[in-house]
Image: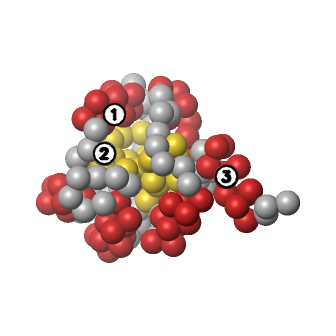
Amino acid sequence: MIKVAFIEDNELLLNEYEATLQVSKEIECVLAVDGIESFIQTYDSEAIDLIFLDLMLVGMDGLNGIPKLQKLVPQASIIILSLYITNKLIAKALKAGASGYLAKGMEGEELINGIKKMYDNKDLFSPDMRDKMLKFFNPL
């Protein structure tokens, strides 16, 4: 069973992620909170494989929260979920310790399949993110 957590301050998205994963027999959402501070307060040392993190949060933002999450849950890969797709932001997130970067908007089976691929380390970037990074590092 793949165990995931979501840190997202948009309540509608957070509820959508949880509802989507309730139908999956292979993925369990063990924690869904609205901020880094909430995660730190409620995390009870349960095993988590993937943490999906919004960058633009109320309170501590995602970039500053990555090192704290890594210290608290060192076995988890941190995947950024963001509407903001700039080379600079992607690079900052990766430099801070994120393992992947996905554009928000994945729904249903797309989200479930994306989580499975990330868990298997097959694809830690959504296609649009991968294209952006390739163009950034190989501008030809």
Q: Are marks 3 and 1 in contact (CB under 8 Å)?
A: no
If you read the primary sequence from the N terminus, does the residue marked by circle 1 or circle 2 appear first? 2
Which mark identifies residue 13?
Answer: 1
Res. 43 visible in picture: no
Real-space CA distance between mark 1 and mark 2, rounded to the nearest whole angstrom: 7 Å
Q: Are marks 1 and 2 in contact (CB under 8 Å)?
A: yes
Residue 134 - label:
none
Report the front residue among 90 and 77.
90
Residue 32: x percent and y percent?
26, 44
Question: From the image, which quarter does the N terminus lie in?
Answer: top left
Q: Earlier in the sequence, mark 3 or mark 1?
A: 1
Q: Is residue 44 left or right of residue 61?
A: left
Residue on which the image places disc 3: 132
Using the image as rendered, state which of residue 85 and residue 129 is in the foreground: 85
Which residue is at a point 20% across and 58% down the rendered structure image?
59
Looking at the rendered structure, the kind of residue marked 1 is Leu
**Residue 66: percent from left, percent from top:** 37, 67
Q: Residue at x 34, y 29 (%)?
A: 16
Is disc 3 surrounded by few (<14), some (14 to 19) or many (20+) residues within 10 Å?
Answer: some
Task: Compare marks 3 and 2 and give the one earlier in the sequence.
Answer: 2
Circle 1 crowding by C-alpha within 10 Å: few under 14, some 14–19, many from 20: some
Separation (CA) of disc 3 from disc 2: 23 Å
